[in-house]
Amino acid sequence: MKPAATRLEWDQAVPAFERPFFAAVRPLLFELDTARWPDLEQLNALAASRGLLNAWGVPVRFVAPGAESASAMGYEIQIGESGEIPTRDNWHDLFNALQWLALPQAKAAINRGHVERLKLGGTAEATARSAPRDVLTMFDESGIIVASADESLLDLVREFRWRELFVERRHAVVSEMRFVLAGHGLMEKSLAPFIGITAKAMLLPVAAGTSLDAAAAAWLGRDDNLADSRRLAPLPLLGIPGWDARNEDSRFYDNAAYFRPGRRGG
């Protein structure tokens, strides 16, 4: 299969996979046949080799979309009940599949959160997402996991103190923080990153060596974290050391339209 419409062909994109944006899925990408667009057979072989399961212990399979998955309600419930993930031939859905393989516990927690609320709220919930489903969707599409045992570093993200974080404490950012892009929509955008590209950050105060997949799943399972979208902090991706060569110059952070000042709680 080949994507119906992409802004970047597969062979052109392969060199981009070496960038930090794709670190979470890079090992998977290079298990695929990089000479051609990955098909469902390849993705399902990876899923089977890892024993990939949804939140209810049902084996996950990637399938061609059908009429039953056309709505948000149908899509999430199909995954929850059958383990079948509708997957189109495009970058967006490919990265979604790869994130299921890279962060299986977090992705299962997202699906569980949707299914439980859809079954409780029915058509009304499917038509107008509740706050918890907004948070789940924002993280699923645009999320990044930011982890550190030093909570003062996480506070700098919460409080938009970009120069203090990325310039004054740059060494600590490199040595004591972990950044894992989790949003499949944002990963698609990262094929051609641009000034303005911003993630929704889940801030995890955890020790080095902690499984970020398990920690993210636990965060997503807590109702208090899903009550307010402000629990996900905006993070300008190109400010992360090593993610854009231009940020080696501290003047890069003078762009207040991108590195916006502010203060937030949560």
Image: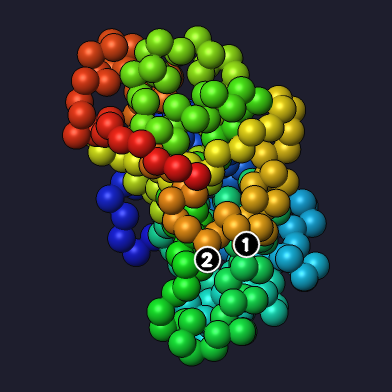
Establish if 18 lies above or below 98.
Answer: above
Q: How is the image coloured?
A: rainbow
Q: What amino acid is found at the position of numbered circle 1 in the picture?
A: Asp
Q: Where does the image place residue 15, in percent across and percent down from the top left?
A: 42, 31
Q: Where does the image place residue 224, in percent across and percent down from the top left?
A: 60, 58
Q: What amino acid is found at the position of numbered circle 2 in the picture?
A: Pro
Tag 2 near tag 1, CB within 8 Å: yes
Which mark is on residue 4?
none
What residue is rendered at 26% in x and 34% in y? 260
Mark 1 — residue?
223
What residue is rendered at 40% in x and 10% in y? 168
As helix, strand or loop, the secondary structure at mark 2 comes to helix
Establish if 83 lies above or below 189.
Answer: below
Mark 2 — residue?
132
What residue is rendered at 44% in x and 36% in y? 158
- The residue closer to the viewer here, 86 or 154, is 154
Along the horizontal axis of the image, is 105 left or right of 6? right
- The residue closer to the viewer here, 239 or 67, is 239
Q: Earlier in the sequence, mark 2 or mark 1?
A: 2
As helix, strand or loop, the secondary structure at mark 1 comes to helix
